[in-house]
Amino acid sequence: MSRFYSKITGCTYIEGMHVIPADAVPISEKRYLEVIANPAPGKVRSHDAEGLPILIDPAPVVLTADELCGSIDAAARSVDALDTLRALEYSLAAPEAQAFKAAGYPAGEVPRAVLAYVINGRTPQEAADSILQASADTAELVYRMRETRLAAKESVRAFVEAGEYDQALAVATGAVELIRTLFATEPTPDVAAEPVAEAVPQ
């Protein structure tokens, strides 16, 4: 049984059973089994000078500057819903807590947002101060995310324009990881945000 391979069709043919294309060349059973029937994982098919199939490493995927910047924006968008809820909560609670603090924490005039947090032995003053700290922590996270995102995108575009793709990829990857780290734990009035390493290399 003689087997043939066509580079044009990418298929094998058996003499006497198939109509064999004009470009087909004989292929050994060993090569057929190794390259076509059971190719090594992670390899792609190519051809040698004789038109016979061979396995090679796939070409690396090179993303454009827009695609790399898009991955940074996508990471930021993934925390937008959480940001919106935080911002809404603190837009209500923080002004009440600040006014309560400015008035000297009057015992008979505890605002609703502060009163809701007067639990587990916490005093109204402690509740107000904790709300204000958590609000400041959340604002800081939002600022750091924005600064990281915008600085990283500028760096990515500059590196791609300079032909330094590996640097661009490293910046984009680092920015995505930092954004996710910044918002991995939601700040609460109890716990201030953990310090995070400063942003992406410029």
Image: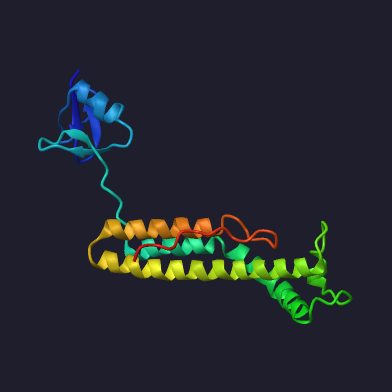
- Count the numbered circles shown: 0
| Residue at position x 84%, y 77% in the image | 106
Report which quarter residue 130 is drawn in: bottom right
Residue 154 lies, in percent from the top left, at: 36, 70
| Residue at position x 32%, y 37% in the image | 42
Q: Depth check: give the residue in front, 160 or 134.
A: 134
Q: Depth check: give the residue in front, 179 or 51.
A: 179
In the picture, the quarter occupied by the C terminus is: bottom left
Position of residue 89 in the picture relative to residue 103 (left or right): left
Which residue is the extreme one toward the right? 108
The answer, for residue 123, to whether it is visible in the render is yes
In the picture, the quarter occupied by the N terminus is: top left
Q: Depth check: give the residue in front, 18 or 153.
A: 153
Position of residue 191 in the picture relative to residue 97 (left or right): left
Residue 117 lies, in percent from the top left, at: 79, 64
Q: Is residue 89 above or below residue 47?
A: below
Position of residue 72 in the picture relative to residue 191 (left or right): left
Q: Is residue 154 above or below residue 188?
A: below
| Residue at position x 82%, y 75% in the image | 111
Residue 59 lies, in percent from the top left, at: 26, 47
The answer, for residue 18, to whether it is visible in the render is no
Which residue is the extreme one toward the front? 104
Report which quarter residue 158 is drawn in: bottom left
Q: Is residue 114 above or below residue 31?
A: below
